Structure formats: C-alpha cells, structure tokens
Image: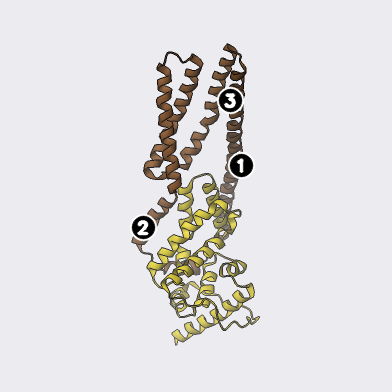
C-alpha cells in the first residue's frame, strides 16, 4: 500500500464516538427491517398458523374424523407451529432473520413428502377419484418444493466454489505483496 | 484499489448474496470507512456532516448490493453514491459550492512532476483545503488511489479529459501552495 496515501489517511481525525455510532447503525441496517405491509403480512401469518394449530389439535380429539385426515391435519399443525418460531420473533423485533428463514425453507420438501405419503396411504385404503386428485396435488407440491430447494442448493454450491477460489486468490495476492516487499 | 481489496469486494458481494448481511456490512465499513470519510470531509463543511453522509452512503450501497452485477465496480459505486449523498446534503444545507471549474483548460502534455511523498502528507492535507472544490475533489480521489482516471470521471460525471485537466491544475496549484509555505 502506498505510504503517502496511508499517511494522508492517518492525518484525518476519526471521532471514536461517531465511529461507534456508525458501527451500531451499520449492524442495525444489516437486518432486514419489516415494512408496514410486511409486518401486517407476518401478523396475518401468525394468526393463520395459530388458528390452524388449534383446528389441527381439535381434529385429533374429534371422533368422527378418520385416521388419514387426522394425520394430514397433524402434519399441517406441526408445520404451522414451526413457522411460528420464525414469525413471532420477526413480528416482535420488526426484522426478519433471512438466514433462519432460508434454513427453514429446506424443511418444505420434507413436509411435502410426509403429506404425500399420508395421501398415498389414503388412496390405497380408499381408491376414489377425489383421493387420487388430492394425491396428484400433493405430488405437484412436492415437486415444486424439491425444485426450489434443489435450485437454491445449486446456487449455494456455485457461490461456495466461488468463495473458496476467491479466498485462495486473496492468499496468493497477499503472498505476492509480501514477496514484492522483500 | 489493490487486487487484494478488489477480491475483498467480491467476497463482500458473495456474503451479501448468501444472506450474511451483517458480515457484508462489516466488510463494507472496514474497506471504505476511512477513505470515503476522507473524501467526504473534502466535500462537506463539518466532520459531523461527513459522518452523516457516510452513514447515508452505506445504507444506500447495502440496499443496492442485491442488484449489483459486477462487485469489482463496487469502489466506483461507493464513491459515486457518497458524492450524490454529499450533494443532496449540501442542497439541504443550502450551502452548495459549484463542483465544476470555470478554468477548464486542456491539460498540458507534460510528464508528471515528482510524486508527492509521505513527508509531504501533512502539508498536502492542509493544502487540499485551500483548493477550489472541483480541484480538491479530483485530487483527493487521485490521492486515495481507489479509482482509476476512468472511474474518477464516472464518479464525478465528467469526461476523462476534464479529470486529467483538473488534476493537472490541482497538482500545480497545490505545489505552488506547498512551495509558498516553505519560503
């Protein structure tokens, strides 16, 4: 690095108080703040999930509901309850944790697969057109969820590779710099 | 910018794309806080104003990172954003000094005089304040070495010839002031 540039920069006084304030503000801006509309959307999601969990619980104790329906409601209830662990903190902090959201999205195909298995069991037990249509819908959902997760995995793998090679390039550049100095 | 710093810009963009926004923001500050603050101090009135504009700059840059295609263009983008934020700040404060020079003669095609040395830094730092804003700005960007002449032209939105001309006159004016200070 050029000595003149470094000396010149060192001459500029930096207020510690302002630097600390900037660091705090930068930390805050790194969070994904929810806009007014997003906050209401999250709230609607939380209310919907709570209602779903309550209905799912009621379905389990209602004698008239058959076993397959109970299982579908139970699976939906578990997914809804899991989503509350993301939505409630986001709602309270008014900011979204993108990383946690991304990792939770990976659970989508697993939930879809669970539902497809239940629907398949239902078709085997009662092979009606309606049950078959539900199974088809489940399969389409599973394919979509898997496709999205697969696409994200490909992008992530690509970025992983690029990041690794850049870190290597950085070390090489660092080494070259050291060699130039000696 | 050095190759190392350009690689850091690319890594910063990857961190941002992968949702590691806190890491990207920290790296943005680590890379640009000192030089951009130095540049802003030459554009706005007080240190406090410079810090405010710097913060606005980082907010805008982080927002725009999502759509940025070439991370190696990040330095020019940061300086351009800082300049626009400084101009907007000046307009709000109603103390705008025009950023164009009325003495835009063509640069004489003479080889550059001896480069400034680290020993001169103190006097250069003071001398910069005495130059007209347009010359001060271009010379500051030149001294910071983060941008090429083409990128400086892009940041201040003038042709490359104008940058060279301003640099020539700014260096000459600064040398005159430095020599005047010695006697």
- Marks 3 and 1 sit apart, C-alpha to C-alpha, by 30 Å
Number of marks: 3
In the rendered structure, find residue A21 and report the number of the disc placed on it: 2
- Labels 2 and 3 touching (C-beta < 8 A): no
Q: What residue occupies the far bottom of the structure in this picture?
A: B183
Quarter occupied by residue B130: bottom left
- Labels 3 and 1 touching (C-beta < 8 A): no
In the rendered structure, find residue A138 and report the number of the disc placed on it: 3
Quarter occupied by residue B150: bottom right
Chain letter of the residue beneath label 1 in the structure image: A
Q: Colour of chain A?
A: brown
Position in image of residue A7 (x %, y %): 45, 68
Question: Disc 2 or 3, which lies upstream in sequence?
Answer: 2
The one of B6 and B44 positioned closer to us in this rendering? B44
In the rendered structure, find residue B130 and report the number of the disc placed on it: none
Asked whether the viewer can see residue A180, the reply is yes
Q: Colour of chain B?
A: yellow
Q: What residue occupies the far top of the structure in this picture?
A: A125
Residue under the point 50% across and 44% down: B19
Question: Disc 3 or 1, which lies upstream in sequence?
Answer: 3
Label 3 secondary element: helix
Q: Residues within 10 Å of mark 2 (few under 14, many from 20)?
A: some
Label 2 secondary element: helix
Name above or below for residue B4 compared with residue A59: below
Q: Which residue is mark 1?
A: A158
Label 1 secondary element: helix
């Amino acid at each position: 690095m050029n000595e003149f540039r470094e000396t010149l920069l060192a001459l500029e006084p930096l207020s510690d108080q302002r630097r600390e304030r900037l660091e705090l503000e930068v930390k805050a801006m790194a969070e994904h703040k929810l806009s007014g509309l997003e906050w209401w959307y999250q709230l609607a999601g939380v209310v919907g999930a709570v209602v779903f969990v309550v209905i799912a619980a009621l379905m389990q104790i209602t004698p008239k509901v058959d076993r397959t329906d109970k299982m579908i409601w139970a699976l939906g209830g578990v997914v809804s309850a899991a989503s509350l662990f993301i939505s409630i903190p986001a709602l309270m902090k008014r900011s979204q944790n993108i990383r946690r959201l991304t990792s939770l999205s990976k659970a989508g195909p697993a939930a879809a697969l669970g539902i497809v298995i239940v629907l398949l069991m239902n078709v085997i037990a009662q092979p009606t057109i309606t049950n078959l249509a539900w199974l088809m819908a489940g399969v389409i959902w599973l394919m979509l969820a898997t496709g999205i997760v697969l696409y994200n995995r490909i992008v992530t793998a690509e970025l992983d590779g690029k990041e690794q090679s850049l870190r290597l390039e950085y070390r090489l550049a660092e080494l070259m710099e050291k060699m130039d100095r000696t | 910018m050095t190759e190392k710093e350009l690689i850091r810009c690319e890594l910063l963009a990857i961190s941002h794309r992968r949702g590691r926004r806190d890491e990207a923001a920290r790296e943005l500050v680590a890379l640009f806080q000192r030089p951009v603050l130095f540049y802003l101090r030459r554009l706005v009135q007080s240190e406090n104003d410079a810090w405010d504009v710097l913060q606005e700059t980082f907010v805008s840059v982080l927002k725009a990172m999502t759509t940025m295609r070439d991370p190696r263009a990040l330095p020019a983008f940061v300086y351009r954003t800082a300049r626009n934020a400084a101009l907007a700040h000046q307009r709000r404060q109603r103390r705008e000094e025009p950023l164009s020079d009325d003495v835009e003669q063509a640069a004489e095609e003479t080889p550059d005089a001896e480069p400034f040395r680290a020993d001169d830094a103190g006097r250069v730092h003071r001398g910069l304040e005495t130059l007209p804003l347009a010359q001060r700005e271009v010379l500051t960007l030149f001294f910071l070495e983060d941008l090429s002449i083409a990128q400086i032209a892009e940041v201040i939105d003038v042709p490359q010839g104008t940058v060279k001309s301003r640099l020539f006159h700014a260096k000459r004016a600064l040398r005159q002031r430095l020599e005047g200070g010695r006697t």
